Each structure stands twice: as structure tokens, then as C-alpha cells.
Amino acid sequence: MVQRTFSIIKPDAVKKNAIGEALGYFEKAGLKVVAMKMLHLTKEEAKGFYIVHKERPFYDELTTFMSEGPIVAVVIEGEDAIVRVREIMGATNPAQAAPGTIRAALGANIERNAVHGSDSGQSASFEIPYFFSALEIMNI
Ligand code: CDP
Ligand code: MG
């Protein structure tokens, strides 16, 4: 099934000058970028995005990290895009991420792991409109 999912190039990867490298993994896998914007989240905006994790011990540090510098937010489209983006990203902890994944190549540690990707259709349905209006998503 053709799906849309949401991904973020996190502040650590933007700082490393690796926006193009990270997006290249998705494009080389045949997935399409159908919406994209660069922005610098406030702490409150990062907290809203990660609201599902509000009870987790890492919530405060994570949202400080996600608001420390610019990010690139994208909508990715393609066959089984949700699970495929997760596979291409690799495990949350870069030390456990499979070789050839984005997090294995670019992640520093379990927090500074270079990319985000929606973990389900339900998450994508919350995350895509958190960043993009219907008019900002292309039909290509
Ligand atoms: O991003 P992913 O879905 O793989 O992992 P998550 O469990 O939804 O956690 C969201 C983000 O919180 C991770 O990508 C990490 O940046 C961060 N995190 C952390 O700092 N410490 C942890 N023990 C777990 C996650
Ligand atoms: Mg997650």
C-alpha cells in the first residue's frame, strides 16, 4: 500500500551537514519526499511533538535536544513507507543499528540519533499535520 510517513532530520544531523546524506537513504530506496521544511522548534513545540513520551525519563532532555538547532521536517511517500522508513533509519540506539542504516552512519548515541520516523499510521496521522498543511504536501 502506498503510504505517507513523517520524518525529521534532527539537529545533530543538520549540524553535521548531513541533510542531503540522510535524505539520500530514502530517495535511493525509491521513496519520495513530498513535503519539506527547515525550522527551529521551540522547547514547547518539541514537547508537543513528543507528547506521547511525556512520562518518560528522557522527555526533558530529548525536547531540549530537539530544540537546540534547526531541523528538517519531511513527508515521505511510497509503498509501505512507514515500516520502510523505520528500517532505513535503524534501531533507536545507533550502537544497535544495523550496518547500512542512517543511525548506524550518523547517530552518536541513543538520544542524538540523527533521524525521526513515524512508528505507525496513527503516529503519522498526528505528526504530518503537526508540521504540514494539506496545501504543503505535493502530489508527485
Ligand atoms: O525514535 P524512535 O521511535 O526510534 O524511539 P522512541 O522510543 O520513540 O524515542 C524517541 C526519541 O527519544 C529517540 O529517537 C531518541 O532521540 C530519544 N530517546 C532517548 O533520548 N533515550 C532513550 N532511552 C530512548 C529514546
Ligand atoms: Mg518513536
Image (spheres, rainbow, N blue to C red):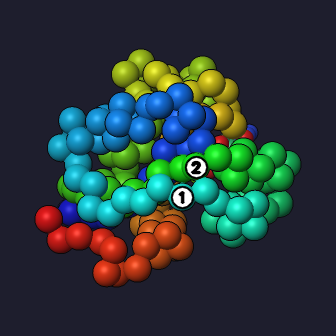
Left or right: where does residue 109 sit relative to residue 105?
right
Q: Where residue 4 appears, x then y in whole percent?
A: 32, 64
Q: Where residue 37 appears, x then y in whole percent?
A: 42, 60
**Residue flagged by tag 2: what amino acid is it?**
Pro
Disc 1 to disc 2, C-alpha distance: 5 Å
- Does any portion of residue 122 appear in the rendered image? no
Residue 88, quarter of picture: top left
The residue singled out by tag 1 in the image is 39
Q: Where residue 19 appears, x then y in whole percent?
A: 42, 38
Write the residue at 31% across / 81% down: 135
Write the residue at 35% across / 36% down: 20
Image: 57 above or below 99:
below
The residue singled out by tag 2 in the image is 70
Ligand 1 within 8 Å of disc 2? The answer is no
Q: Along the polypeptide, which appears first: circle 1 or circle 2?
A: 1
Residue furthest out toward the left: 140
Residue 49, quarter of picture: bottom right
Along the line of sight, the residue nearer the viewer: 101 or 132:
132
* Circle 2 residues within 10 Å: few <14, some 14–19, many ≥20: some
Along the line of sight, the residue nearer the viewer: 138 or 120:
138
**Residue flagged by tag 1: what amino acid is it?**
Leu
Q: Quadrant of the C terminus?
A: bottom left
Q: Say whether marks 1 and 2 touch (CB < 8 Å).
A: yes
Ligand 1: which quarter? top right
Write the residue at 37% across / 59% down: 36
Please count the marks in the image. 2
Image: 102 above or below 124:
above
Image: 125 above or below 73:
below
Along the line of sight, the residue nearer the viewer: 14 or 10:
14
